[in-house]
Image (cartoon, rainbow, N blue to C red):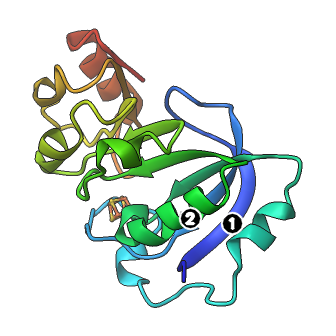
Amino acid sequence: MLKINTIFYSSQETGYNAGMKAIIVCMSGCNKKCWFCNTKQHIKINEYLVSKNLKTELLKYSPSTRVMFTGGEPLLQKDNILMFIRNYPEYTYYLETNGTIALTEEEFKLFTWVTVSPKDDEIPILLFKGFCHEIKIVWTGVEDLDLYENFTQVKYLCSCSELNNEMQTRREACNRHQAWRY
Ligand code: SF4
């Protein structure tokens, strides 16, 4: 059973695919506790829509066939998500993960696009290097962008609403690290 928090149809707000419309499937629960988290899925792990049948839900947004798994941390439910994807290959699948739970090469190839959004650790570098299309970091002013120099080519800094002057500091960080966009 997939534990889903919410499902809605919307445009991707940030990163390489900004503006792309998709059915956004927000999975319940997270294994991180980021102070700036706006979903609070790490403390709402037992709040989910047990009655949702994902295929039935996706049909409500027909003819859209683009599905984005996000969270929380969707790969906490990796086996069930991958089973769903294998059962319904008529959809294209996008993933946004914090990078703490690995995908094999075969699993990675089930997704059209994988975004890794690391939080305060280097685990994603070990687990996802070569297995992601995009890195997206929530900029809180202290992240070491040099860590991700050779991680992947597509790199984005996203805003942290809790940070003062976040736009200015993000712009300055991207000026110092030319491969990053904001
Ligand atoms: S990884 Fe994402 S969902 Fe999880 S606590 Fe951090 S910001 Fe929230």
> Helix, strand or loop at disc 1?
strand
- Looking at the image, residue 102 sits to the left or right of residue 147; the answer is right
Which numbered circle lies on residue 26? 2
Vertical side of 121 occupied by 78: above or below: below
Residue, disc 1: 7
Residue 124: percent from left, percent from top: 19, 45
Q: Assign a secondary structure to mark 2.
A: strand
Asked whether the residues under the numbered discs 2 and 1 touch, taking CB atoms below 8 Å apart as contact, a structural biologist would say: yes
Total number of numbered discs in the rendering: 2
In the image, ligand 1 is in what quadrant?
bottom left
Which of the image's four quarters has the N terminus?
bottom right
Residue 151 coordinates in the image, percent (x, y): 21, 27
Q: Nearer the viewer, residue 63 or 23?
A: 63
Residue 105 drawn above or below residue 4:
above
* Position in image of residue 65 (x %, y %): 76, 46
- Could you say which quadrant of the image residue 112 lies in? top right
Q: Position of residue 125 (x, y in %)?
A: 15, 39
Identify the residue at horizontal 48%, vertical 48% (top origin): 95
Identity of the amino acid at label 1? Ile
Amino acid type of the residue tagged 2 in the rendering? Cys
Residue 138 position by quadrant: top left
* Residue 71 visible in the displayed image: yes
* Residue at image location 28% in from the left, 11% down from the top: 175
Instruction: Using the image as rendered, state which of residue 148 and residue 77 is in the foreground.
Output: 77
Q: Which mark is residue 177?
A: none
Q: Residues within 10 Å of mark 2 (few under 14, many from 20)?
A: many
In the image, is 7 to the left or to the right of 112?
right
